[in-house]
Amino acid sequence: MDFFDLLTMIGGLALFLYGMHLLSEGLEKLSGGRLERVLENLTNNRLKAVLLGAGVTAVIQSSSATTVMVVGFVNSGIMKLSQAIGIIMGANVGTTITSWLLSLTGIESDSFFLQLVKPTSFSPVLAAIGVVFIMFMKNGRKRELGTILVGFAILMTGMDTMSSAVKPLSQVPEFTGLFTMFTNPLLGLLVGALVTAVIQSSSASVGILQALCVTGSINYAAAVPIILGQNIGTCVTAMMSGVGASKNARRASIVHLLFNIIGTAIFMIVFYTLNAVMDFAFMEEAADSAGIALVHTGFNVLATLVLLPFANFLEKLSLIIIKPDEEEERQAMENELFAKMDERFLSTPSFALEQAYSYVLKMAALTKDSLKGATENLFVFDKKHVKDIEQIESLVDRYEDEVSGYLVKLSSRNLSEPDSRKLNMLLHSVGDLERISDHAINLVDCAKTMNKKEQHFSEKATEELKIFSQAVCDIVDASISVLETGDETAAKSIEPFEEAIDVLQKEMKKRHVKRLRKGKCTAEMGFVLSDITNNYERIADHCSNLAINVMQLGEDDTHAHEYVDSIEKGEGSAFDQMMQECLRRYELPAKAVK
């Protein structure tokens, strides 16, 4: 093996790791967060947890990704530590599917059908299909499918390149002698753990070992402890994800480490005791890809079967290692409100986006409550009620800070086109909701001013203002409903509603001027009324923005002003008919101006 063979092997390793990353990323995007929601809704059935953990990991082909995600769930309070244990055990089983896929590269036969089964035979076809999907398909899901196909092809190409590059090593005595050092099981265990800890993927390190097996210089005596060490090394990623997390999240990462350490210890004691008594003949035989996959799977399945009944013991052991304290409970209460927007979820953007969306809807509900309370205070002032509204507004501001910050961090991730549009919609919507809440506080300030000066609107003005207030509350309800449902048809009705509110505002001002001329109202109250109606009109503007934000989800280049300018508003148009319907619904009483 010369210098250029070494370069080829490094290139093959790079392709292998990148292909695995691309495959995993494409699958996560195509799932649209559904895999994560399955875990979120997990029951306390441990067997089901193991099966789901194995299934999810088999799909995304990364036990590290699954365990990091589980640590995030535990940290946010979505999942209990007891539920996480089953998922972690299942992840170790699910990750073995990669080694079986890679073992297919070792098929040697002149049979056309057997050759066709080899991934190196069909992966070029998959790559071609994937490239067509990525370059020529506009549908987001088909493009993600293309990414998956290309990722799989790159992974297999990298594996084949590594195997070809290391084949000459079988003729190098120095290289063969190097692996005789691994006859010491503990040294082999350490090597496997360190290599996997560095590249943070047991699937990748097992794949590298399978590639080296083509030299024929690695026997099972050397391979078995290395494989066991690889399972310990893969815990590094989960341990890193636990840094700075809640104690329960750190316990989840500790459980992952304990499972592999205890499982490895039991397996080594039993296996090498039996070997000493029975002298396994295959230990001196050269290992192959299928044998490596079998050992990898056998260990993880047996470890899960042995330790699953002792899951409660692992949980208690993690509590002993990371002891609970009073501060933990206090911090849990403080962080509970926004805990579901965990930064660990940013590695699975679709799910992180769903979490942010749920908080936007909570923020919308608070905004609606704030406005409702503010309008009631205009007519019946209540100091306690005012304090409640101010607290809600403060909480809405906190929502804006937390959600906006989380969305900004998420925007730097590799999002699919639909997710990217949804993120922009949520980011704009958060700003509109916060501004509506600010206007509600402005209304409270108007109520405070009237109460302090003991001022009141005339009976007719009060009657008109109640109708106007109801119209504004209704448009807020309607726009928030659009935000919740994503109903584009309902969204199109908001802009005519907003125009109707503009007409109502102008009519309110005209009627006030007429009352002022007749001496039935004061100029000072006119200023208060103007403040109220101006705030109402701006609230309606933000409602229009919310609706247009939702409509933009289905469009790539539509902007709010462009949409508004493109609407046909002439007399008799559909827009005009909807606006007139709103005006009839909130018609001001005719006697009010007499």
Image (cartoon, grey):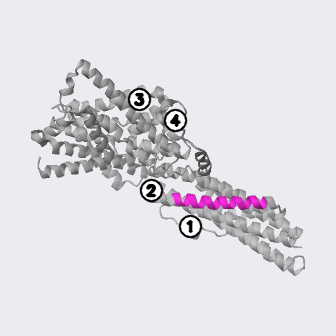
Mark nearer the N terminus (1 vs 4): 4
The residue sitting at 18% across, 52% down in the picture is: 7
**Residue 543 placement (x, y as % from top left):** 65, 63
- Which one is earlier in the sequence, the residue at label 1 or at label 3? 3
Contact check, label 2 and label 4, Cβ < 8 Å: no
Q: Are marks 1 and 4 in contact (CB under 8 Å)?
A: no
Q: Is residue 361 above or below residue 239?
A: below
Badge 1 density bin: few <14, some 14–19, many ≥20, Cα 10 Å: some
On residue 417, the disc is: 2
Does residue 34 show up?
no
Q: Which mark is residue 304?
A: 3
Dot in front, 2 or 3: 3
**Residue 392 belongs to the span the image colors magenta:** yes
Residue type (three-letter) at the residue carrying disc 4: Gln
Left or right side of 477 for 209: left
Q: Amino acid at mark 1?
A: Ala
Disc 2/disc 3 C-alpha distance (Å): 39 Å
Query: The C terminus appears in which quarter of the rendering?
Result: bottom right
Residue 218: quadrant of the picture: top left
Measuring from the top left, give residue 536's x and y in whole percent. Answer: 72, 67
Q: How many marks?
A: 4
> Dot 4, crowdedness within 10 Å: few (<14), some or many (≥20)?
many
Asked whether the residues under the numbered discs 3 and 4 touch, taking CB atoms below 8 Å apart as contact, a structural biologist would say: no
Establish if 573 lies above or below 510. above
Q: Please tell me whether residue 562 belongs to the stretch shown in magenta.
A: no
Where disc 1 sits, the SS reads: helix
| Badge 2: residue crowd in 10 Å (few <14, some 14–19, many ≥20) | some
Q: Which residues are magenta?
A: 385-406
